[in-house]
Amino acid sequence: MMTVCFYEFQVVFVSLCKSFWDCGLVALDDITVTLGECQNTGVFWPSPPGQCDFELNECGYSQERKDKSSWHRMRGRTPTSYTGPNGDHTSGVGYYMYIEASNMNYGKKARLISKELWGFSGQQCLTFFYHMHGSGMGLLSVYLKKKGENREILLWRRRGEQGISWLKGLIEYESSKAHQIVFEAIRGLS
Ligand SMILES: [Ca+2]
């Protein structure tokens, strides 16, 4: 007599990432906007509403589109932890925003946009911490979008692999008009 056994099993794919070369990740944390030049941080200035450590929520940072290929708020390791940070920048155990290349088509953009920030006649300092690891992620760009203007001004850009740790981005810019800051990730050809 022959016994046939059926086993129930489930296969869970947490990522479409097939290999390291197909993977890539960009993470963001601890965004701060202060009035005055960056070297003056430490001096008290009333700050425009641009800060976010992502611990409680996204602080008014929003996305142009919400789907798989958009920024996600995340705690702990990412599904493909070998391309992601082990923890956030704020405390190591908190939340951050991230986007994974394997969820995106080549050339696709994911844009995280601040709420409207105050205009100021002088320098403003934007600091943030970013993590770009894995060869699949193409570009991380930061744009200044002034109110009433269609053209966005490129403030900062990094391309490809930047290492396995959190790095500090620091930008001085001027806008006497109300404005928004845009963090844009684009998947490149790996
Ligand atoms: Ca955080």
Image (spheres, grey):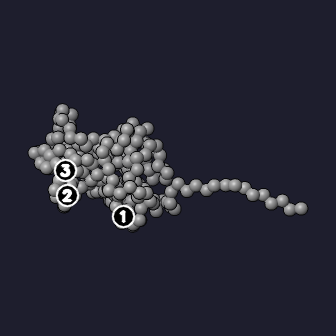
Residue tagged 3:
179
Circles 2 and 1: CB distance less than 8 Å?
no
Q: Quadrant of the C terminus?
A: bottom left
Question: What residue occupies the far left of the structure in this picture?
Answer: 121
Name the mark on residue 153.
2
Q: Write down the quadrant of residue 67 in the picture.
A: bottom left
Q: First in sequence: mark 2 or mark 1?
A: 1
Outermost residue, right direction?
Answer: 1
Tell me the crowding category of disc 2: few under 14, some 14 to 19, or many 20 or more residues within 10 angstroms, Cα based: few
Q: Is tag 3's residue or tag 1's residue first in the polypeptide sequence? A: 1
Q: Earlier in the sequence, mark 2 or mark 3?
A: 2
Residue 30, position in %: x, y? Answer: 32, 42
Is disc 1 surrounded by few (<14), some (14 to 19) or many (20+) residues within 10 Å? some
x, y percent for residue 80 = 49, 53
Which residue is identified by label 1? Answer: 108
- Say what amino acid the circle numbered 3 marks: His
Q: Can the viewer see residue 115 in this picture?
A: yes
Q: Amino acid at mark 2?
A: Ile
Decide if residue 24 is in sight here: no
Residue occupying the point 43% across, 38% down: 93
- Per the image, label 3 sits on a secondary structure element best described as strand
Q: Quadrant of the N terminus?
A: bottom right
* Marks 3 and 1, how far apart at CA: 24 Å
Please tell me which residue lies in front, 150 or 75.
150
Tag 3 near tag 1, CB within 8 Å: no
Q: Position of residue 73 (x, y in %)?
A: 40, 47
